[in-house]
Every structure is written in structure tokens, then in C-alpha cells.
Image (cartoon, coloured by chain):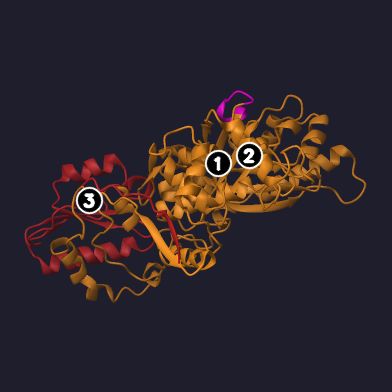
Amino acid sequence: MVTLEFHDPSGALDVTQPHAPRLASLAGARIGFVSNEQWQAYRMLPMIKELLEVDFPDIEVLPINAFPQGNELIGSEETAALVKQSGVDAVIVANAA
Amino acid sequence: MKNAVSGLGLAPDAAMVTFPIEMFLPGSDLASLPGRKQEFYDGLTRWQPGFVKNTARAAPMLSVEGASYEDALNKANQLLLTNLWGDGLPLWPATRERVDWILRGAAFPRAHVIGKFPPRGGVTTVETCAVALAMAGGRPEYLPVLIAAVEAFLDPESNSEQLQATSGGPFPVVIVNGPIAKAIRLNSGFGCLGPDPQRPAGASIGRALRLLQQNVGGALPGIGTMAIFGAMRYTNAVFAEDEAALPQGWQPHATDRHGYTSGTNSVSLVFANGVTNVRRRGAKKELPQEDALNGMWRMADFMRTPNLGALSGYEKGTPGIMLISPVVAKMMAALGWTQASIRQFLWENSRIPTQQLKRAGAPAWLEIDANPITRDSIKLDPWPITLKPENIVLVVAGGDHPTHFHWLQAHSPRVIGRVMRVPESFDGLLADADRDLGCGSDACRI
């Protein structure tokens, strides 16, 4: 038998931070949207906002344009700071590519 | 999306609700959306990642066994493909011996970290590059070019994080200047964008870069990259400027664009999303002046199109790369054309009347651009395709033939330059190449 040993070409992954803990409940939660505003986001996100507000009456869902929108802006440190300052409990990131 | 999550340093996993493309089209039926609401709720409350903090996943060694070397080689290629690490063409398994050989071309330690390859965020070391180059059929003397190209690619200003994933399918174009190009058999002449058995460096370097984009950066078709067509993605485009053929007074691209001293070994990286031939030469008995001017008009006419992918480079990038063959460069220089006057002509005469922009719906893309300078340009009529003539990249390369220009349409927020470093033993590597490939860089048969 001939054995060939060779490198995995995918490179190492360095996991440096944990995912945010999930919310215990959406009741009373404050939710925001960060959107790249592509395609039908202007129709889809208001529907999701409404569904949340109907199913969880004490929830607060920020307007879909509460934070900067667009591919160039949603990944910026400035947007991240604004999200943090807003005091939301969770964010739904909307990305259509 | 998992790539993006991974690239941020999170575990490569995320709470996602995905929808079919039809729901993103104008006038789409969104009636099914409420039926998916529980997925959103669960993502916010119940979802748990499969990984925990600080779980570094180092790439291991792989192993296959075969009844013969050929059988083992076949199994190795099958393993690479089934793990989504191939490109459909045969690969050299990156054995320790082959990778160590490639690493003879490194001026840095093998563990030197160049950066994280976006969007997946795979840690990219000198060894990672050597593995890709080994798989792509490369040689040690190519490694300095690949490493410089990777450095340029990973420069945050290149915006490679988005360009890797976008539907327009941009591919990196690596323009090499300096004596290393000829020394390693990198093509600057006939067929410089394609395969050449006597000057094979560009194919291997470009293929290695592509393998890094896919395997380390996560740009898998339809998953990690939404490139609809994916042109030029087997080998990207890696070629040299024909500096020896530059007319008197013309500067090498690397000097012109990046300020590098002539003779510096360097790369210049541009993202392009198209390659087009433009017939330049006249067909009858034109005078030299007419021949030159007609050709320039045909080039400008071709450029006068709202290439919205180039908006990201409107201020500081480029609308594209114009390849001008050595014989045409000499002919035009003899008529008094300079690099500056060529760019000025193309810039002025590729401007688009606002009426044409409007009928193509282009103003909407200008209005939403993140750069205020680009947004403000909507006031200009005719609208210049780039902020200033100097943004147009002009490179002397290609066969010594007068009939065509070539235009690589860009999607490139910047043009990124990097100076190369070669190891002290580099001359020995070149001697090895002369021995192995049968002809010196000056003695090729064609």
C-alpha cells in the first residue's frame, strides 16, 4: 500500500469570542434590525416587526431604519456602537446578497 | 453568512432564517413569511452554537492509502473534491516534502501570519500560501509573488471581504512589476492572461490565490460567494508589465500608481469583473494619426457604459485596466501621446450623458452610494465614469501586435500595491528553475 499524507488546505480557524447568549423570552424584550437594505427588505422587515409585536404585546421593536443601512455601513464600528448604545436586547441582521 | 460570522471571530455557525431567491424579487409573494416566524423566535431565544469560545481549530494533516501511487493520488484528489477544496482540475496533494520545497521561496518564517482570509476568516500563514501553491502546481520562486498578492488581497482597504461574496463575481488581477517577473517566467507578452507552457508562473500563482480564496476564505460558489457567473476563477489574472517595452518617458505601472522606484519587485492588485477585447486597428489606409485616434475612440466608446460595480472605486479605485500592447504604446508615443494624455482622452470621452444614465436606472445606485463624493457626482452631465483620469489603470503588456486593446472592467474600491521580499537563496531557486524547465527566461523557444 502507498500512503499519501498531505496538508488540509483550509487554514486554521481562530474562534475568539462567543456568540451572544440567547434571550430567556421575547416578552418585554427590545429588538432592533440591522439591514443591508437590499431588494425586498423594505417589505419583509416591517412584516417581521409586526409579527413580533402581535405575538409579544409587551415587546419593543425599533423601526427598521433605526440604524444605518446598506452594505457599506452595517459592518462598521460606528454602527456597532450605535447598536450598543441603543440598549437593544437582540438584533436581527437582514442580509440579502 | 456563516463565513461572515466566522470572519468576526465567532464560531462558524449562526442562527439563520433563509429564504428562496424568489422572495427577494420585486413584487414577490411574501405570504409564506408568517409561517416561518417561529424560526425567528427560536433564533433569538433557543438556538445554541455547536462551538465554544477559544476553540481554535487547527488544520490537520490528511492521509489516504492506495494500492499504488496512482491510486493514492486519485484518492487524494477525490478527498480534496469531496471536502470542497478543489477546482475540478487535478491537484498536487500538498505533502510535507512538496510544501517544504515551496517554502524555500519564503523570506518569512513558515508560521508568519499574513492575516485572516475573508470572509470566513481562515488564518493565513506563509505555510498556508505554500500549501495552496503546492496544490496549484507552483514552484518556490513563485512564492514571493503569491505572498505579496495575498498581503494586498487582505489589506482591509481592498474590501475583499465583500468582493469575495458579491454576486458580480470580481476576480483579483495581479500586475507584477520589477525584474522578478522575467526571472520567474511570468508572462508579459503574447497570451499574458492565459496559459503559456514556457511562462507558467501566472497560472500557478493565480490558481493558488483562487484556492486560498475558496478554501481559506470560504468563497464556495453559491454558498460563500454568490458570483453568478464566476469568470476567470480558475486562475484569476496574474501577469507582468512589459517594462522593457515602455516608450521613453513612460513610467512602469507600479511607479505611476504606487510610487515605487523603477526596478522594485512589486504587485498591484485590482479586482475586475470582466475582460473584453476591443479592436483598435483600422481596416483600410488610415494615416497613423487616424489609426491611433480611431482606436482611442473605440476604447472610449466601450468604456462609456454605466458599470455600477465600479462605483465602489469611484473616488480612490479604478474603473478598469487598459492593456495596451508594446507596439501600440511605441506607435502612440511616437505620435506624441503620453500616459497622461491617453487617460485624459479616455476620461473625457467616456463620460455618459445624464439622459442615458437615467434610462438605465443608474442614478438610483449613485444616490445610495456610501461615498458622498460618488453621490455628488450625479450632478455632473455628462457623468464621468470615475472621479479623475488618473484612476484609469494603464498597463503595457500583451503580444507585439497592433490590432487590439484589452479592457478589464473593474469592481475595485482601491488599487493595492505591495513590495515583494525574496529569500537570500533566490538566485539558487532560479538556477533550479532553469534546470527543471529546460530553458532560461531569455531562451524560451517562442
User: Which is nearer the N-term, disc 1 or disc 3?
Assistant: 3
Q: Secondary structure at mark 3?
A: loop
Chain B, which colour? Answer: orange
Q: Which residue is mark 1?
A: B140
Which residue lies at the image location 90% right of the left edge and 40% below the top edge? Answer: B287
Q: Which chain is red?
A: A
Q: Amino acid at mark 3?
A: Thr
Contact check, label 2 and label 1, Cβ < 8 Å: yes
Q: Nearer the viewer, mark 3 or mark 2?
A: 2
Q: Secondary structure at mark 1?
A: helix
Residue contact at pointers 3 and 2, CB within 8 angstroms: no
Q: Which residues are magenta?
A: B255-263
Among the two numbered marks 3 and 2 on one chain, the one whose residue lies closer to the N terminus: 3
Frontmost residue, B337 versus B128: B128
Question: What whole-number distance in Å separates the C-alpha atoms at marks 3 and 2?
Answer: 42 Å
> Residue shown at 50%/56% (left/top)?
B168
Look at the numbered disc 2 and give the secondary structure of its residue.
helix
Q: Which residue is mark 2?
A: B432
Asked if labels 3 and 2 share a chain, the reply is: yes
Q: CA distance from mark 2 to mark 1?
A: 10 Å
